[in-house]
Amino acid sequence: MSSAWEGFTAQHAVGDVLDGRVASVFPFGAFIEVADGIHGLLVGPEQRQVGSSVSVRIAEVDHDNRRLRLTAS
């Protein structure tokens, strides 16, 4: 049985633009939910509201640690 992470990374790659939802906000950036159970870090000083929609681009996929680094698209 494959995990949500494996399914997500089989369908998406660096450079893909995705619509997501702001899940949590910190001084260094925000975690964006880009699929059910899949979150990535969008680093930057922009003020974001939890629950708001955002368009992001996948900048890096860290398969070993199951992490995504995102940039604003």
Image: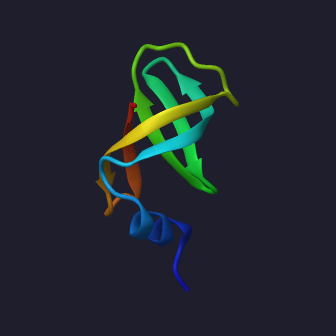
Note whether 66 is above or below 70 in the view shown. below
Picture coordinates of residue 19 (x, y %)?
A: 55, 41
Query: Where's residue 15, x and y in %?
Result: 31, 47
Look at the picture and state if 57 lies above or below 1.
above
Q: How is the image coloured?
A: rainbow
Q: Residue furthest right?
A: 51
Q: On the rendered image, what quadrant is the N terminus found in?
A: bottom right
- Which of 40 and 14 lies nearest the eye of the viewer? 14
Residue visible at 56% across and 31% down? Answer: 54
Q: Residue 36: give x, y in percent of width and height.
A: 64, 56
Asked where in the image residue 10 lies, by quadrant, the reply is bottom left
User: Residue 72: percent from the left, percent from the top?
Assistant: 40, 28
The residue shown at (65%, 20%) is 49
Q: Nearer the viewer, residue 70 or 31?
A: 70
What residue is rendered at 49% in x and 44% in y? Answer: 18
Please tell me which residue lies in front, 48 or 67: 48
Report the number of discs: 0
- Tell me if 36 is positioned left or right of 18 in this view: right
**Left or right: where does residue 63 sit relative to residue 54?**
left
Q: Which quadrant holds residue 21?
A: top right
- From the viewer's perspective, is 29 left or right of 38? left
Foreground residue, 19 or 7? 19
Furthest residue toward bottom: 1
